[in-house]
Image (tube, rainbow, N blue to C red):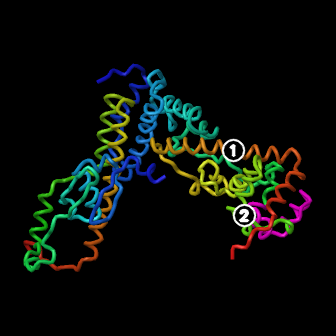
Amino acid sequence: MDIPTTSETAIYRLQNYLQRLPLSRFQAVEILEAKLNIYQLLHLYQVFFSKQFAASRASTLPIGQGHSARERELLDLLYEHCFPLSEWAMEWAYEQRLEHIPIEDKGIDWQCEDGIEGLLDEWKILIPLSSEGYYWLTSIDRDLAEWYELEFGISIQTIQPPEQVPQDLLRKRCLQAGTPLKFLPLVLRVLDKNTGNVWLDEQCSCCYGWDYSSKYPWTEASIRFLTKQWHRAHKAIDCCNEFTNWLGQDLQAHFNIVLELWNQPYPSTN
Amino acid sequence: MSNDIHEDKLLVLLEGQQHWVRKSIAQNDDLLRMLFSGLSPELAAAEIQRSPSQIKIVPKKGTKGTIHSAYNLPTTASVLAALDAAPSQVDPAILMCVKLRKIELLQGINPCNAQAIVEQIETAIDCSKHWSNSVKQSLKKFDQSPSVSTIPVGF
């Protein structure tokens, strides 16, 4: 038996004497799930950052209901080397255990409460070209189409509905138009939250509730998957930025170029 | 993405159906039987056939449907005797709690054991859930079976 080197360690270990046996399997499973979280994070630290783990002297003792200093080191390393972790998650880790890997939306969430207000004009002007956006402007409230017209001086009537634009043909035409127009289909998928990438499609948990947020367990497979996804998301964000920066340089003129491409007649598929 | 999901699991075949089972359970015959006995109690005695490419569970053939089965119905006394003789068992999750308490008393939170403890906790939680399901199924069967009046000894 190792001799505890600090009073905190001794107290933590002696607390095991005081603990009562779980009275039911539910209680036992609850205790085990909390312990599992501790050991999963310590295991992942060793798997993904073995050198840093070997050099670390941080305590492994949980602080209150939160993560231990050693586990929080893992969160910092994941943030630094693998994928983004939100500020709230890092703060939360001091007080509560993160039961799942926290996923924060890194895409565009204009449908979130007040989301449209904070959206940059170069994104806002593209809303009628996205399926969700066109539906929102034309089917929810008549005032919305008027709002768009007032904001950008463009009537919705002059824009071809997205469902009438064959995506494969649009992609082909955008590719032929070169950079940055070739990124238009991706930008629209980002607006529709339809990219297939967890970091770009995540719904806002504040608006939709926790039940709708992604829940990835603390496993090696999850970390590898989310890291790979973040690399792809990062590239996609760069492409979107290139497109919207170009659009923002001369919003009206450049959007007219986009509209010209968008409104080109497409051969009937019937 | 499906490969990522099944990364730490092995494919187990039961009567043509595919089941992805966590490696820590699939590699152990007893745990595998315990897991599948939740689906059907007779699988507790099933044969496990292993080959490099797959794990197969073969249920043991019983007397179900044979002409003798009607004459071999257990009596109340034999059922009570079997229950009496059965070893008392504690839920795997409760056992694991006790084990972990002992480990942490002696070593505190020791990161060197983290992987082994993760596997043991996951196995205990899985087994506990299957235990609970099989108990629920048994109780449901008892509930649905026709009542048989018996006169206890001494009355």
Magenta-highlighted residues: A128-155
Q: Which mark is residue A131?
A: 2
The residues tagged by marks 1 and 2 sit, at their Cα atoms, a distance apart of 20 Å
Q: Quadrant of residue B116?
A: top left
| In the image, residue A224 above or below residue A211 | above
Residue A152: image location, x then y, percent: 89, 57
Asked whether the viewer can see residue A24, the reply is: no
SS for callout 2: helix
* Quarter of the rendering containing residue A46: top left
Query: Which corner quadrant holds the C terminus of chain A?
Result: bottom right
**Counting residues from the N terminus, which is met first, the one under dot 1 or under dot 2?**
2
Report the predominant secondary structure element of the magenta stretch. helix
Question: Which three-letter amino acid code belongs to the residue tagged 1?
Answer: Ile
| Residue drawn at point x = 69 percent, y = 73 percent | A269
- Say if A130 sits above or below A51 in the image: below
Label annotation for residue A237: 1
